[in-house]
Image (tube, rainbow, N blue to C red):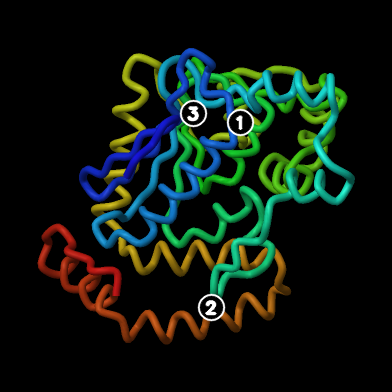
Amino acid sequence: MLTEETSYEVADRVATITLNRPDKLNAWTATMEKEVRTSLEEAERDDHVGIIVLTGAGRGFCAGADMSLLSSVAAQGLPGGERDALAQLGGTSLKRQGVPPDFQKKYSYFLGIEKPILAAINGPAVGLGLVIALYCDVRLASDAARFSTTFAQRGLIAEYGMAWMLPRIVGLPNALDLLFSARQINAAEALRLGLVNQVFAQENFLDKANQYAVDLASRVSPRSLRVIKRQVYGAMFQSLAESFDLAVEEMVASLRSEDFKEGVAHFLEKRAPVFKGK
């Protein structure tokens, strides 16, 4: 796969996508956006991939939208009329078969990718960079990571569904504080707020994050991960009764699966599992 601003590699059933503009703290561009989407779809198709990791090269995860683009828009405005501006900012629906419309928008499509996506946040995750991290399923942070919404400081708003995602992750009061103040928080506060799942020391951060991913890829059923991810995000739009009934249907299907049989067999035989995702 040819890439200009990202890299992609697979090892130990983990696909690692690295934002690769270290001199710009991996500031987000249209090229990067296309490459990340292509890489995520490639990892989703690849039977040798169980877990996807998204990280940044150098000192940063993603410092937000490239400032050269923002400076140009501030000086000249968006090209075209209002309809063109809406299309440019909102993107187009991906039209992924079987995926709800909510998970087919620009960036929200991360939630429709069947395999877990881990954000390995090795440095600043700011503005659009934080949006990208929020759409990942699990967020692991270096103790050198820093977080800020920044939007209000730029005269902007809660972009790309952040007003929906952030309160569901950190709670409404914390989300409003982070959005209103646009203040920067460190990894320890991010952990306290629930913005990240775990924090590791910078000197061995990538090793720890990769080990987390490898453990998931090797110890648990890919089929279970796929179904659970779909259940959890789908439940955000369901009543308890609907979520319960769907779980019963999925339980019946899981009891007929090869991974269920292997899950029982490896436990009884006291050996490592060999799941096939079926």
Q: How dense is the environment of label 2, judged by Cα within 10 Å: few (below 14), some, or many (20 and up)?
A: some
Q: Amino acid at mark 2?
A: Ala
Of labels 3 and 2, the one closer to you? 3
Image location (x, y in percent) of residue 245? 60, 83
> Where 200 falls versus 53 (above or below)?
above
Image location (x, y in percent) of residue 44? 39, 58
Of labels 2 and 1, the one closer to you? 1
Q: Amino acid at mark 1?
A: Gly
Q: Residue at x 67, y 67 (%)?
A: 101
- Regarding mark 1 in the picture, which secondary structure is present there? helix
Q: Nearer the viewer, residue 161 or 248?
A: 161
Q: CA distance from mark 3 to mark 2?
A: 32 Å
> Where 44 falls versus 167 (above or below)?
below
**Which label is found at residue 247?**
2
Q: How dense is the environment of label 3, judged by Cα within 10 Å: few (below 14), some, or many (20 and up)?
A: many
- Regarding mark 3 in the picture, which secondary structure is present there? strand
From the viewer's perspective, tell me whether residue 139 is left or right of residue 11. right
Query: What residue did someone put label 1 on?
Result: 129
Image location (x, y in percent) of residue 171? 75, 42
Image location (x, y in percent) of residue 236? 69, 63
From the viewer's perspective, tell me whether residue 178 is left or right of residue 194. right
Point out the tag, 2 or 1, that comes first from the N-terminus. 1
Of labels 1 and 3, the one closer to you? 1
Q: Amino acid at mark 3?
A: Ile
Q: How dense is the environment of label 1, judged by Cα within 10 Å: few (below 14), some, or many (20 and up)?
A: many
Q: Residue at x 53, y 66 (%)?
A: 230
**Which label is found at residue 121?**
3
Q: CA distance from mark 2 to mark 1?
A: 34 Å
From the viewer's perspective, tell me whether residue 130 is left or right of residue 23. right
Point out the tag, 1 or 3, that comes first from the N-terminus. 3
